[in-house]
Image: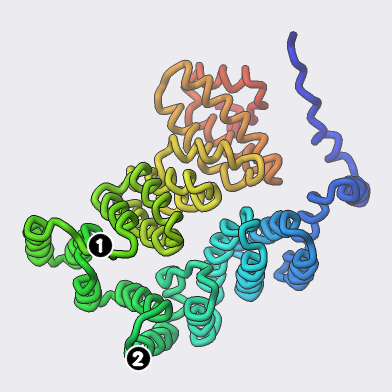
Amino acid sequence: MRVTSPPDLRPYLRTLDAETLADLLCAQADRDPELRHSLELRAATQSGDVTEAHRLLDAAVTDGNVEYTAKVGAVLDTLGRLLDAGSRADLAPLARRTVDDISEMLEQAGEHAGDLGDRLDRAVELYARACAARPPDPEKLADWILEVEFDGPGWPVIELADFAGPLGETGLKRIKSTVDDVLTQGGAGPRRDVAERLQEELAEVLGDVDGLVAILSAKPPRVDVSLKIVRVLRAAGRHSEAIAHAARALTHDKIVPKLEVPPEDETVSLRRKEFDAGPSRETYAALREAATAAGRWTAQRRAALARLRELASEDTEGVDLLVRVLLDDGRPDEAWRACVRFGGSLGLSVELAQERAAEHPAETIPVFRAEVDELIERKDPQAYQEAARRLKLLRGLHKRAGTPEEFTAHLATLVETHRRKSRLITEIRAARIAMPKPRNPSA
């Protein structure tokens, strides 16, 4: 039995006046709360007016956890859309408020946090982008970071490198001053642990190679630490020092094959050593299991992901490993952002895009376009057929994203570029995709 596609209503809708269309849309929004909320957010942030968006966040706080998570997700989508579009509005206050609100909700929710952790990570990323677009007062930004790091509940995760530009010399100097004060006080405890981590991040951000190497060298001997020292020296062009350090590390490992193992938790230390020696999904999972049982997973996860991000910055294989690990952790949003940021393989990008397309059509369009290009380059009849299917999918994504004209323009360019590939053109027609009019009919 042949299934008939629903009729395309766009030709009819284009005949309606704006007021009639507005009435139809409002009537549907009254029946669909999700559509209403999306429209309210678009209206709230149009022309830089974010006052209504703040009001919607006020209302969201009074909702249950599940409803709050959904609403704050819509707020984050709107922030991302505005930043992608190069909005001139100062979005940093709204982004920071979203970070603070989610942090508070996460603390209240406890074990019932659901997807709030992913939402918080994304909010921090958007706040960093908003600060880069419209830098706030660097000292106030530094004070916020210090408050989160030293007085917060352990989240959100702040990467100084993401805020280095907006912080500038003034903000980084303020953070360094506080870090130095904490380290000078001596003693042990969470504050010192935070200060030591920030000291290392500051050295990286400021490009202090000698300082960073000194900090890393002072740590207990571990494979991942030695490898990082070698990478830092190589990146600075100090290849002979990198070779010498690698040789010393190998010699030390032969003389002292057993690394320092905290007596209180040898299992976690052993699993960490295995992960550092061979980062993989399996060694990461083993570390997660041991550290979770010992109540030390938060710190261990942060260190392990930092190692995986270093690998991701080196090659596509490292990117795919990081993304797979994040998926294993049940963090699909974070996995998607890592794939986009570091540039995962096309196959994995498509896999993620297929899962993400339903809720975030606009974000997945570039991935499917790249897949179409790759399929066409194969110059194979079956690949042409699959490319046509993907073009049909892209048409739907553009429609749901509100950018159908972009698909029309993209298709016109693609057809013009590959006009001599008759089999491809035939497959596009067979997929019932309206072909664009020739740009030069006389040709």
* Whole-number angstrom distance, CA of label 2 to CA of label 1: 26 Å
> Residue at point 32% right, 54% down?
267
Left or right: where 253 falls relative to 315? left
Left or right: where 263 falls relative to 142? left
Q: Is residue 165 above or below residue 77?
A: below
Mark 1, other Cα within 10 Å: few <14 / some 14–19 / many ≥20? some
Disc 2: which residue: 185
Q: Tell me if residue 73 can be seen.
A: yes
Q: Are discs 2 and 1 less than 8 Å apart at CB?
A: no
Q: Which amino acid type is shown beneath numbered disc 1? A: Val
Q: Quadrant of the N terminus?
A: top right
Mark 2 secondary-structure assignment:
loop
Mark 2, other Cα within 10 Å: few <14 / some 14–19 / many ≥20? few
> Residue at point 75% right, 16% down?
3
Question: In x, y percent, where is residue 141?
Answer: 52, 81
Mark 1 secondary-structure assignment:
loop
